[in-house]
Amino acid sequence: MTDAKLKPKSVDGTEPHGAGNSPQETASTVEVMPPPDAIEPDPELTPEEAEQARKRYLLKRFWISARRYWGRGGDKFAWPFSIGLLAMIGMNVGFQYGINLWNRGIFDAIERHDAGTVYFLSAVFVPLVLGTVAIVTIQVAVRMMIQRRWRSWLTTAVIARWLANGRYYQLNLIGGDHKNPEARISEDLRIATEAPVDFIAGVISAFLAASTFIVVLWTIGGALTLPIAGFTVTIPGFLVITAVLYAAITSSSMAVIGRYFVHVSEAKNQAEAEFRYTLTHVRENGESIALLGGEEEERNDLDKTFANVLKQWALLARQHMRTTLVSHGSMLIAPVVPVLLCAPKFLEGSMTLGQVMQAASAFAIVQGAFGWLVDNYPRLADWNACARRLASLMMSLDGLERAEQSDSLGRIKHGETEGESMLSLNDLSVSLDDGTAVVTETRVEIEPGERVLVAGESGSGKSTLVRAISGLWPWGSGSVNFHADRRLFMLPQRPYIPSGTLRRAVAYPGAADSWTPDEIKAALAKVGLDYLNDKIEEDAPWDQTLSGGEKQRLAFARLLLHQPDIIVLDEATAALDEKSQDKMMQMVIDELPEVTIVSVAHRAELEAFHSRKITLERRKGGAKLVSDIDLIKRKRKRNLLSRVLKNPSMPKVSTTSNKDSAVPE
C-alpha cells in the first residue's frame, strides 16, 4: 500500500461531504456547472396545466446541460465534427442533384435512341454512385462519432454529479421523480443524445434537399394550364404546389393520429425500467428469497410488472399501426403523383421523357424532405420521453446541490477537531429533508484510542447518526469534526462486495494490486477465512457466494490492510455468532491497538471490548444523548463534562464508571 493517507470514507468507499474530491476533480473531462435556479410553478395553474408546464421545463432542463458539450467546458472536437457533418450533408445533396440530372439525361437519350450518350452516361453513373456511397459512409461515421462523444461527455458529467457527496445515496432519502437512476443514465441518456444528432442532421438535409429540388420542380414543371367550364386556368409551379399540399396533408395527418405518441412512449419506458429493476432486485436478493421460499410471491410481482409492460407495448403498437398507415400509404402514392401530373404535358409534347423522370425523382426527394416528420415522429416521441426522464434525475440532483450550497434546510458542517481529539460532534442535530428532527443536540468528543459504544433502542437514530458522521446524511445542524490527516474507515452491517476477484473484494476500496497476495492471504487468515486463500484470484459472484458472516469477516480483513486511525462499526458483527464476534473484536484490538473505535450495536456483550458507552433515547422531538459513561476508568475527564458544566442549558448526563444508563435530569 502507498504512503498516501486515506481520506475519511463513507460506508461504500465514497468521499463524505467536505472531505472528498469535488465534482470537477472527479470528472476531469467535463466542467461541472452550478445547477440552474429552481423554477416554482404558477399557483394559478390547474393541475393539468402545471403538469404540462413541468414537462416543457424538463426538456429545457435537459438542454441546459446537454448543450454545454458545444460550450467552453465541452469537447474540443465538438465543433470540428459538427462542421464536418454539415459539409458531408451539403456534398450529399450535391451528389443527389447530380444523379437527378443524370436521370434526365439518360431517359432523354433513350427517347432519342442516342446510343453514344447512353453509353457515356452509363459510365458516368459509376463515379456518381461511388461518390454518393463514400459521402454517405463518411457522413454516418462523423454523425455516430458526435453521438458517441456527446454521450460520453454527458454521461461523465451526470455520473460525476450523481456520485459527488453521496448524492446517489441521498436520492433514496428524498422525494421526486428519479426512480431507477441507472436506467436513466444508461438507456435514456443514450437515446437522448443519439436522437437529436439524427434529427438535426435530418432536418438540415431535408431543408437543403427541399430548397434544391423545389427549384428543379419549378423549372422543369413550369405552369399547368387546365380548361375548366370553358375557361383556362393556369397554375404556376404546379409540381411545387402539389408537393407542398401533399406533404401538409400527410404531416398534419401524422400529427393528429400520433398526438398521444409522446405520453405512450414515456409510459412504456417507465414500465420497462420498473421491470428491469424488479428483475435486478430478485437477483440481488436471491439467497433470502430462496431461503424463505418466496418464489411464488416474486413470480406474482414479476407477472404484475411485466403485465404493465405488455399493456404499454400494446398501446404503443396501436400508435405505430396508425402512423404506419399514414407513412406507408404516403410512400406508395408519392412516386405516382408527379408522373400523373406530368403525363398531359408529356403527351402533348411540351415535356420530354427525361424531364418527366427528373420531375418524378425531384418530387420524391421533396416529398421525402417535407415528410420528415411522418418518418421520424415515433422516434421523436421516444426521444421526448427519454429526455424528460433524464431531466427529472438532473432536477433531483439540482435540488441536492442547491441544498448543499444553501442553509435554508440546514446542513451539517464537516471540519477538523481542535487539539488531540480524534472525532467531535458539536451541537449535532440530524433531521429529515423536510426538517423533522431525528437526533438533536448531540455533543460528543472522542479521544485517540477510545473505543466508544453507541447504544439505544431500535429507531433511536443510531444508524442515522453514523450516516451523519460519514457525510451521507447532510440535513441538520452542528458539525462533525475529524482530526486532521487521520484516516476513517466504516464497516456497515451489509458490507459491499464489488464484482471481480476475491482479492479485489478484500482490498476494496483500495486497488487490488496495492497489496501482495501474501498480505491478502494473511489478512484473510486472521479473520478466519484462510480456507479462501486459494481462491483470491478467482473471478466469481462473491456477493452471492459468501454468507453474511463471511462478508462481515472479509470487511474486518479490510481493516487490517488499510489500518485506519478511526473505525466506525455499524452493526458490523450482527451476522456473527457471539464467539466469532468476540474473536473479531479482540483481533482488531490486538492488531490495531491505537485505533479509535465508534461502534453501533445492540448486543450487550460488546461492552467488554469498549472503554466508553453513550446511549441515545428516542423522544418526541428527536433522539437525544441521555447517558455517557466510562466502561473503563480513565485518568482524565473528558471535555464533554466540562462543557456540560459551562453550559447549564444542556441536559446533564451521567459520567460515572458504571454500566447503568442514566436518565437526564
Image: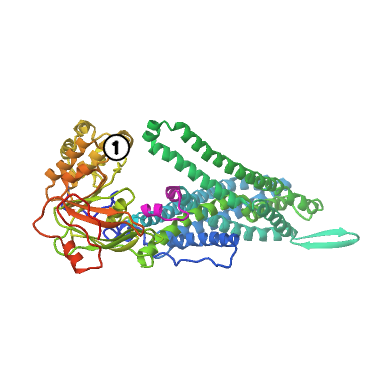
Give above or below for 637 relative to 463: below
Residue 261 place in picture, x, y as percent: 61, 50
Dividing the picture into quadrants, the one containing residue 618 is bottom left
Q: Is residue 549 magenta?
A: no
Residue furthest right in the image = 230
Per the rendered image, the range of residues in magenta is 168-186
Q: Position of residue 42 (x, y in %)?
A: 55, 67
Instruction: Tell me the amino acid under the disc marked 1.
Output: Gly
The residue at the point 37 percent across, 54 percent down is 170
- Residue 623 falls in image quadrant: bottom left
The answer to whether residue 74 is left or right of residue 428 is: right
- Comparing 246 with 648, the one in front is 648
| Horizontal and vertical percent position of residue 108 | 70, 50
Q: Main secondary structure of the magenta part?
A: helix
- Which residue corresponds to mark 1? 548
Secondary structure at numbered mark 1: helix
174 in magenta: yes
Position in image of residue 180 (x %, y %):
44, 48
Q: Is residue 367 visible?
A: yes
Mark 1 surroundings: few (<14), some (14-19) or many (≥20) residues within 10 A: some
Q: Is residue 571 left or right of residue 86?
A: left
Inspect this view and state whether residue 79 appears.
no
